[in-house]
Image (cartoon, rainbow, N blue to C red):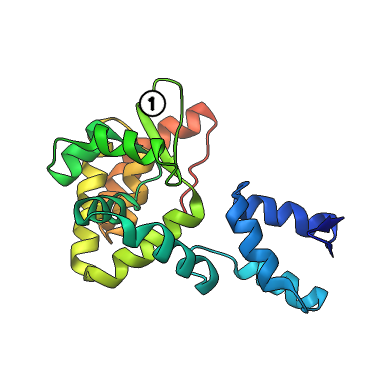
């Protein structure tokens, strides 16, 4: 099949769709980076395509991130550690009161923020945008502060009885004792329910 008159095998198109999640500008950026490249180079570029890739990060920095106010930048970077972004959760995590307005404005302005349901209680970021934001977070916060952010998120998820999310953040925060404690409490239940814990 072809993308902008560049022939790509079906497997590559599937990978590209997964990487860009239908983001049209991402497809266009990818197209400009493909011209003159061999099939092998294209496959390698596909594998490397993420939010920290220079082609993507330059676009997001110049056209999205740098245009935001400082409080919005701070919100985006710190919430980039979350799989799901909810107003009440973010208020508690960041010690603010306007997360609902921020999330609604991000969605309204098409800033790679999508509601997970019609109720709009939870949102998620386009994964390339989230990867970019996380790279920015690591550039401005030290490891200790990032670990604390993950630990605080883990505590909030645990209070919500979302143990698997709590474990994921405790792992990121290098809180292995808390991970073991949660796994001990959670393991038997997961086995009885026939579920497997997936942590990335």
Q: 42 or 84: nearer the eye? A: 42
From the top left corner, tell me how far across and down residue 193 is, in percent.
Answer: 50, 27
Instruction: Examine the rendered structure and indicate whether residue 46 appears above or below residue 160.
Output: below
From the top left corner, tell me how far across and down residue 113 is, in percent.
Answer: 42, 42
Residue shown at the point (44%, 61%) measured from the top left: 60
Instruction: Examine the rendered structure and indicate whether residue 162 appears above or below residue 141.
Output: above
**Image quadrant where residue 29 sits:** bottom right
Secondary element at image label 1: loop
User: How many numbered circles are shown?
Assistant: 1
Question: Is 24 situated left or right of 132 in this image?
Answer: right
Instruction: Examine the rendered structure and indicate whether residue 158 appears above or below residue 26.
Output: above
From the top left corner, tell me how far across and down residue 68 is, in percent.
Answer: 29, 54
Residue shown at the point (46%, 25%) measured from the top left: 117
Q: How crowded is mark 1: few (under 14 residues within 10 Å), some or many (20 or more)?
A: some
Residue shown at the point (87%, 55%) measured from the top left: 1
Q: Mark 1 points at which residue?
A: 120
Residue shown at the point (72%, 72%) measured from the top left: 34
Q: 159 or 195: nearer the eye? A: 159
Question: Is 167 situated left or right of 17 in this image?
Answer: left
Instruction: Examine the rendered structure and indicate whether residue 128 appears above or below residue 62.
Output: above
**Image quadrant where residue 4 sits:** bottom right
């Amino acid at each position: 099949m072809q993308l902008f008159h560049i022939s790509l095998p079906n497997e590559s198109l599937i990978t590209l769709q997964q990487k860009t999640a239908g983001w049209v500008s991402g497809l266009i950026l990818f197209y400009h980076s493909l011209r003159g490249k061999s099939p092998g180079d294209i496959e390698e570029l596909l594998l490397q395509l993420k939010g920290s890739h220079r082609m993507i990060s330059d676009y997001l920095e110049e056209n999205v991130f740098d245009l935001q106010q400082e409080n919005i930048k701070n919100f985006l970077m710190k919430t980039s550690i979350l799989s799901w972004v909810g107003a009440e959760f973010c208020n508690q995590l960041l010690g603010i009161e306007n997360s609902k307005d921020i999330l609604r404005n991000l969605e309204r302005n098409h800033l790679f923020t999508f509601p997970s349901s019609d109720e709009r209680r939870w949102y998620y970021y386009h994964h390339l945008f989230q990867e970019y934001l996380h790279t920015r977070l690591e550039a401005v916060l030290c490891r200790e502060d990032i670990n604390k952010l993950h630990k605080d998120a883990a505590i909030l998820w645990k209070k919500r009885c979302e143990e698997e999310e709590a474990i994921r953040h405790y792992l990121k925060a290098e809180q292995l004792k808390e991970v073991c404690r949660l796994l001990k409490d959670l393991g038997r239940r997961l086995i009885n329910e026939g579920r497997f814990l997936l942590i990335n």
